């Protein structure tokens, strides 16, 4: 996808953003967590999203992408670092300003059940949001709910149905309409099509694209699915163990990935290649324990191009080419500006 928004103002920016969770009691999972240990879910992430752009954030389970989304939505407090929305540090906003920011930044989740009231009809659940945000007239709320549902392609004859009477795609359309009800500028979409059938996925992705074009929305699109981010994103940030290892325009990342992890992800995406390769085989092992990450480059135990320096030194994020960053000892260039 060629971006026409590279010169647009930056809407969202994170700088050295980190979220570390203290382990209070052993969770007994495969990582053998012990009390007192620290899980570095997000570990120094610096990204920016320009107005009208879609930044895809891609990585395996455990890469920290959902925690990153929660930090941007202020559902988590950062351990360190900042999140700026329109140049304002949102974690330092006053209570009044926080309420305004909640309108400006909306979330769409994989499972719309968690945001929809199971006892309310589709129309009522949209009207509820409109009432909270100041539309006082019942007639206006009903008309606006209808308009919003039409905008997301939801059949008007189903407006009185409850969430459990709808298909997965129908529920996702309703959750998108609810998000639109408050006129947001930024939408954080966390795996919004992962639970849908492939044909429905395509329809909902088309809808995201149409809404961006028509309403000038900006998206942070979090997913494990490279085919999805390729279709929708102007730029992609590849996350591994809480860190951005590469960030580039979508076309550049897919035509010439620089980081060995990005290459392995592309090789492991069967829908992008004629020859099917399992992700496990392509990546050569599992994600390491995030509580005791490997020394040096955290990807080194799985990297086919590992060198001695990789085990000792953390690679800095650099800019080997204009408008793209990578954190890998194979590449050289000026430090990325964070
Ligand atoms: Fe591989 Fe070394 Fe680059 Fe890490 S720094 S991705 S181990 S080559």
Image (spheres, rainbow, N blue to C red):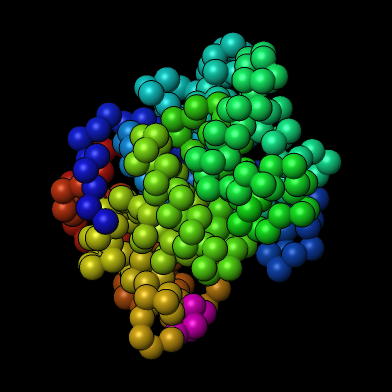
Question: Residue 175: horizontal and vertical position, in percent?
Answer: 62, 43
Count of residue discs: 0
Q: Is residue 254 left or right of residue 203?
A: left
Q: Which one is nearer the viewer's eye here, 40 or 175?
A: 175
Q: Residue furthest right?
A: 119
| Residue 314 in view here | no
Q: Residue at x 23, y 68 (%)?
A: 255
Q: Which residues are magenta?
A: 277-281
Quadrant of residue 160 in the image? top right
Residue at 42 percent across and 42 percent down: it is 211
How far across and how far down the image is residue 272, in percent? 37, 75
The one nearer the camera, 141 or 113, is 141
* Location of the N terminus (image quadrant): bottom left
Q: Is residue 106 left or right of residue 257?
A: right
In the image, residue 220 sits, relative to residue 136, either above or below, namely below
Q: Residue at x 49, y 46 (%)?
A: 43
């Amino acid at each position: 996808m060629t971006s026409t928004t590279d010169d647009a103002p930056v809407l969202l920016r994170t700088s050295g953003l980190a979220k570390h969770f203290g382990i209070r009691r052993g969770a007994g999972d495969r990582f053998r967590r012990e009390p007192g240990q620290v899980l570095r879910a997000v570990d120094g992430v610096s990204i920016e999203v320009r107005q009208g752009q879609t930044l895809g954030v891609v990585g395996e389970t455990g890469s920290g992408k959902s925690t990153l989304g929660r930090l941007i939505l202020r559902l988590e407090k950062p351990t360190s670092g900042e999140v700026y929305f329109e140049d304002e540090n949102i974690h330092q906003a006053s209570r009044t300003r926080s309420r305004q920011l909640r309108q400006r930044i909306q979330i769409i989740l994989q499972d719309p059940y968690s945001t929809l009231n199971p006892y309310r009809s589709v129309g009522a659940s949209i009207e509820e949001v409109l009432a909270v945000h100041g539309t006082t007239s019942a007639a206006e709320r009903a008309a606006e709910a209808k308009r919003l549902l039409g905008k997301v392609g939801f059949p008007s004859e189903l407006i009185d149905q409850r969430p459990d009477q709808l298909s997965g795609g129908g529920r996702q359309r309703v959750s998108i309409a609810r998000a639109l009800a408050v006129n947001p500028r930024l939408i954080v979409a966390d795996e919004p099509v992962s639970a849908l059938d492939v044909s429905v996925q395509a329809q909902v992705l088309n809808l995201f694209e149409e809404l961006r074009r028509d309403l000038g929305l900006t998206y942070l699109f979090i997913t494990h699915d490279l085919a999805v981010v390729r279709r929708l994103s102007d730029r992609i940030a590849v996350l591994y163990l809480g860190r951005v290892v590469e960030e580039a325009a979508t076309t550049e990342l897919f035509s010439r990935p620089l980081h060995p992890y990005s290459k392995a992800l592309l090789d492991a995406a069967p829908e992008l290649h004629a020859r099917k390769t399992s992700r496990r085989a392509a990546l050569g092992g599992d994600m390491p324990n995030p509580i005791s990450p490997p020394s040096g480059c955290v990807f080194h135990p799985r990297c086919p191009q590992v060198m001695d320096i990789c085990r000792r030194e953390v690679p800095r994020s650099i800019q080997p080419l204009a408008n793209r960053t990578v954190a890998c000892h194979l590449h050289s260039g000026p430090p990325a500006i964070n």
